Image (spheres, helix red, strand yellow):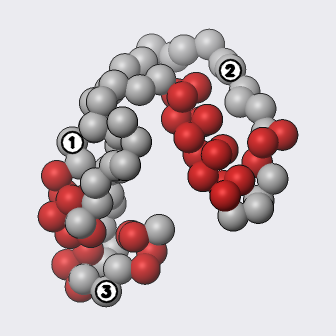
Amino acid sequence: MRAVTTENPDAIKQGQNVAFGKRTSLNKRFEYIQNWLNRFKLNAMNAKPTHLDFKANDVKHSLTDISKSNNLLKYLSNIR
């Protein structure tokens, strides 16, 4: 939401990485997003992830650098 509502002209039309500051599975990320949407009464709790086989170039594990998002948007994850 910070990227959508920012008034920082340097952050406009910029791609932003957001992450949790630690290695996190896609299933856990799905759960976090689901819970976040539910806070706004968007009834995401009935949504189920679709699991597909991994492809050759899929990233199975990542730890995203969020320094750009921190600098431009003052983003810090509150999930620990």
- Residue labelled with disc 3: 7
Whole-angstrom CA distance, mark 2 to mark 3, is 37 Å
Of residues 33 and 15, the one nearer the viewer is 33
Whole-angstrom CA distance, mark 1 to mark 3, is 22 Å
Image location (x, y in percent) of residue 48: 77, 32
Q: Quadrant of residue 37?
A: bottom right
- Could you tell me how many numbered marks the image carries? 3
Could one spot residue 59 in this view of the protein? no
Of residues 53 and 26, the one nearer the viewer is 26
Image location (x, y in percent) of residue 70: 21, 59
- Circle on res. 18: none
Could one spot residue 32 in this view of the protein? yes
Image location (x, y in percent) of residue 6: 35, 80
Q: Quadrant of the C terminus?
A: top left
- Residue labelled with disc 1: 65
Q: Amino acid at mark 2?
A: His
Image location (x, y in percent) of residue 26: 52, 27
At horizontal 76% and vertical 61% (from top left) the residue drawn is 41
Which callout, 2 or 3, points at the residue further toward the start of the chain?
3
Q: Secondary structure at mark 1?
A: loop
- Residue labelled with disc 2: 51
Q: Check contact, mark 1 vs mark 3: CB within 8 A.
A: no
Q: Secondary structure at mark 3?
A: loop
In the picture shown, does residue 21 fall above or below 27?
below
Horizontal relation, residue 65 to residue 17: left or right:
left
Horizontal relation, residue 45 to residue 74: left or right:
right
Q: Amino acid at mark 3?
A: Glu
